[in-house]
Structure formats: structure tokens, C-alpha cells
Amino acid sequence: MNLDKTDDLPDAERARAALAALRGEVGKTVVGQESVVTGLVIALLCRGHVLLEGVPGTAKTLLVKTLARSLELDFKRVQFTPDLMPGDVTGSLIYDNRSAEFEFRPGPVFTNLLLADEINRTPPKTQASLLEAMEERQVSVEGTARPLPDPFVVCATQNPVEYEGTYPLPEAQLDRFLVKLTVPVPARDEEITMLQRHAAGFDPSDLSEVKPVAGAADLAAGRAQVRAVHLDPKVAAYVVDLCRATRQSPSLALGVSPRGATALLATARAWAWLSGRDYVSPDDVKALARPTLRHRVQLRPEAELEGATADGVLDGILAHVPAPR
């Protein structure tokens, strides 16, 4: 990993510079998704999992693969399909004829960064096989618990417009994801740039130009600094008031749980540190409210019929709940 420009900086500053450099590396292959990359970095700092949602062709898979290559971390990808079994993800016991014993063969979940591609295409039983891994950071096979590597982050993708043959994630599993990031269609100028790259011979399967710019040590240093970010009691109360407002909203059948409040606090602290501050501001909370909370609320059917969206309801709550000064 080349850190020549940051070798003379303190550990915290070097870690921040290295993680900030991820944007530039990912930008070598993926155009116009800087905010999504920032969300992924925040999740890595919080040891949280990410749900990426976007229409087909918005480079969700390429985005995660490029991010993995920019990090000195182990990476594996699983294509979730209707016939995928839990053991295909977690691993299973295999009988060894030579030793006449059963040996555990680890599944792809034993990695640092796992790409669960099209997670809503596999049945609930296989989706649930990730629950223990995501929450406990271990898997149990035949009664034996096996710890996963550290860090361990799941990046799952799903298509929001194609529902035939899919299995929507239940609320219990959605709550395991720290953030839900919407991958938008690039703006016109960005799409033109993308086409020009392809016309010049760009091959999405060739990531040789992407170099590792950060690693596990940078993430560890960053996490230590994030834990030290100061939280004013007024800002903590603001986080609670926002989450309580979702439980009282007439448009929502399900509001944000206390787990969601702690998630919003964690992402706001990570964003504050990435921004170069050692304290959390109300603007940090506002900036991370939608990606952290949008998948933790559930619209009432009548609100959906009227065209309401989770982001729209959250925007209304952000506008009405007074922020501390």
C-alpha cells in the first residue's frame, strides 16, 4: 500500500487521508457515486452492513468490487439465487475419506467484505443464514460456533423494481443493515463521461488500475477516533426525538427502534470524524438520517396509495423536529 504522502502524519490523520482516498480510487471505474462510496466508508468505520438498492445497470456490483480492491481486505462474492442453500453461504461439514472424519469447509462468509448480490432472490431460509453472521459475527454449524474475521462487513444488493421471483427481506433482517444506500442513475454529464470511457476501451472486468490505498490498520485507527468523537447531550436528545417522531407519525405503521437510534448516532459520529471534526453536530445527524433510517420504517398502506415514501416522511420529520443550536 502506497502511503508515501501520509507517512509523516499522525495515525488518525493518516487513516482519515487513506479512507478519503478511496473516493478517488473507486472513481477510476465508477462515475458519479461519491455519496454512495462515502456511505460504504462510514459503514466500514462503524463495522456495519450495507444494503445497496438501485435499478439494474447502475454499477452496484462493480462499485463494491472496486471498493474491495481499493482496500487491503479479503473479498468474496455470492450470487444469491432461488436454489442457494444456507450451507453454500456459511460452509458445511464434509466427510474426509482419508481421515474418516468430518471436516468443516468454510463458506464464502469467512471473509472481510462479502458481496451478497441480489439478496432478495434467495429464499428466507438462506437469507436467515446471514442473520447470525451479521449480528454475532460468527456462524454455527452442527452446534459449533466459528468466529468470522475482523473486520466483517456484508454489502448486499437488491433491485427495487423487479418483484417477480423475489423474497423481500423481513424487518428483522433489514434492521441488521446499518445503512440502506440508494444507487441513483448517473446525471447526464456523468453518463456521457461513462460512455466516453467505454468508447476508449474501458473494461469493467479489468480493475488493474485500481490500487489499494487503505487497509485494516487504517480502519482500526479510524474506529478508535470515531469512538472518541464528542457527543453533546442536546445532540443525543435530538437523535432520540427524531426516532420517537417516526413512531408517532400517522404515515408510518412501524417507526425506528432504539437500535435505529444507536445506528444513527454511530453513522453521525463517523461522518463527523471523516469531515475533520471531533464533535457531532445536528447537521451530521440530518445528513445521515435518511440512509440510516429509511429501511427501519414501514409505511401504512393508505400512505403508500397516496404516493408517500419513506424518504419523504423522514424529510417531513427532519423539518418539524427542532434541532439544537
Image (spheres, rainbow, N blue to C red):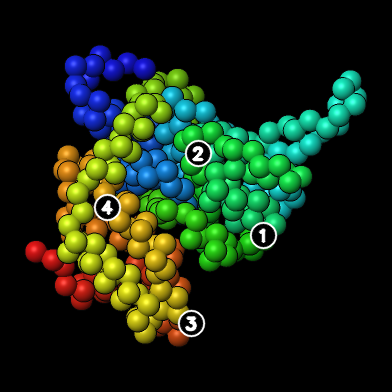
Of residues 223 and 55, the one nearer the viewer is 223
Q: Which mark is residue 197?
A: none
Q: How crowded is the residue under tag 2: few (<14 C-alpha within 10 Å), some, or many (20+)?
A: many
Q: CA distance from mark 1 to mark 4?
A: 31 Å
* For discs 3 and 1, the disc positioned in front in the rendered view: 1
From this view, report whether residue 74 is shown above or below residue 1. below
Residue type highlighted by circle 4: Ala
Of callouts 3 and 1, the N-terminal one: 1
Disc 1 secondary structure class:
helix
Whether residues under marks 4 and 2 lie with C-beta atoms below 8 angstroms apart, the answer is no
Disc 3 versus disc 2: distance between alpha carbons?
36 Å
Q: Position of residue 239 (x, y in %)?
A: 27, 64
Tally the numbered discs.
Answer: 4
Label 4: how many residues lie within 10 Å, few (<14), some (14-19) or many (20+)?
A: many
Instruction: Answer with left or right where residue 26 lies relative to residue 12.
Output: right
From this viewpoint, is residue 196 visible? no
- The residue indicated by pointer 2 is 152
Residue 268 disc label: 4
- How far apart in space, not on screen, are marks 4 and 2 (Cα)? 21 Å
Task: Assess whether mark 4 and mark 1 are in contact (beta carbons under 8 angstroms).
Answer: no
Q: Of the numbered discs in the image, which one, if any, rests on residue 124? A: 1
